[in-house]
Image: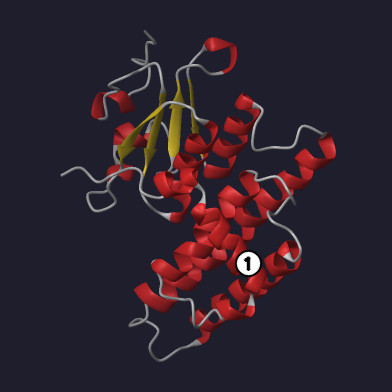
């Protein structure tokens, strides 16, 4: 039985099975990435729902694992050297899980780094820009009702990023070609989220990006996605 007592987060969110990966997350574009990856990899894990409504992510217990106060975060009782490890930042977690299992990442150096660059493309571009678009388009629309500049700025940048992704996916099944990788997993929840969370499909001209739309449907249709997109479940 793994000993996770050194991690204060387990006092607030006790591990029912401390021998499996502990996932602390929410059903946001960033949050679902890790559950999807874990399902793809077939790794056993235990999800914990981190409520934004009650600021769980700002609690001392959560901050002890992720000082940045954001989801997702994980704790792997079987980390490097057989010792527990805690990790935050979705891109770092995806890379860790891929390297831990030897899956979802090409084995050759060139393919590996090419995949990582597309992970960074999402982390530095798609996520922040789509998130800001959603903020000003939906959640802060009343605050910028007399100033369209913020929404237009992030809308246009989101569309530019979609055009980059469109060019990459033209004639490809996945971002890396024939192989489904962490580059796909880290990116598609944001393209999906801009539609279902922000209602941005029309304003972002999704219809003008047919390769992206076809790829998105393929990503969503994977069995691991069907499960992971709905994890963790909000406690009743």
Colour pattern: secondary structure
Rendered position, 148 above or below 38: below
Q: Residue 2: where, in percent of width, then height?
A: 39, 11
Could you say which is closer to the camera, residue 38 or residue 226?
226
User: Can you tell which quarter of the image residue 4 is in?
Assistant: top left
Question: Which residue is at the far left?
Answer: 236
- Helix, strand or loop at mark 1: helix
Q: Quadrant of residue 215?
A: bottom right
From the top left corner, tell me how far across and down residue 52 is, in percent: 29, 51
Residue 63 is drawn in which quadrant?
Answer: top left
Residue at x 68%, y 54% (from the top left corner)? 174
Between 175 and 65, the one nearer to me in the picture: 175
Please determine whether, in this image, residue 86 is positioned above or below residue 123: above
Query: Seen from this angle, which residue lies furthest right?
Result: 110
Q: Residue at x 58, y 79 (%)?
A: 207
Does residue 67 show up? Answer: no
The answer to whether residue 40 is seen in the rendering is yes
Given residues 113 and 6, the one toward you in this image is: 113
Quadrant assignment for the C terminus:
top left
When the figure is inspected, residue 200 is found, relative to residue 230, above or below; the finding is: below
Quadrant that contains the N terminus: top left
Which residue is the site of mark 1? Answer: 212
State the image coordinates of residue 114 (x, y, percent, origin top left): 78, 47
Q: Position of residue 193 (x, y in %)?
A: 45, 63
Left or right placement of residue 26 versus residue 125 in this view: left
């Amino acid at each position: 039985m793994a000993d996770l007592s050194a991690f204060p987060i387990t006092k607030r969110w006790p591990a029912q099975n401390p021998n499996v990966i502990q996932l602390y997350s929410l059903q946001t574009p960033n949050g679902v990435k890790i559950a999807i990856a874990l399902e793809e990899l077939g790794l056993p894990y235990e999800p914990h729902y981190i409520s934004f409504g009650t600021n769980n992510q700002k609690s001392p217990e959560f901050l002890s694992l992720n000082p940045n106060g954001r989801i997702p975060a994980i704790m792997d009782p079987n980390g490097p050297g057989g010792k527990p490890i805690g990790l935050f930042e979705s891109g770092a977690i995806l890379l860790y899980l891929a390297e831990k299992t030897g899956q979802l990442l090409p084995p050759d150096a060139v393919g590996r780094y090419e995949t990582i660059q597309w992970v960074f493309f999402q982390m530095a571009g798609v996520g922040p820009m789509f998130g800001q678009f959603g903020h000003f388009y939906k959640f802060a629309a009343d605050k910028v009702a007399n100033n369209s500049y913020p929404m237009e700025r992030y809308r246009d940048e989101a569309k530019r990023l979609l055009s980059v992704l469109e060019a990459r996916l033209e004639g490809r099944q996945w971002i890396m070609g024939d192989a489904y990788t962490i580059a796909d997993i880290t990116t598609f929840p944001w393209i999906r989220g801009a539609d279902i969370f922000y209602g941005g499909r029309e304003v972002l001209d999704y219809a003008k990006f047919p390769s992206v739309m076809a790829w998105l449907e393929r990503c969503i249709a994977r069995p691991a996605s069907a499960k992971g997109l709905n994890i963790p479940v909000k406690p009743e």
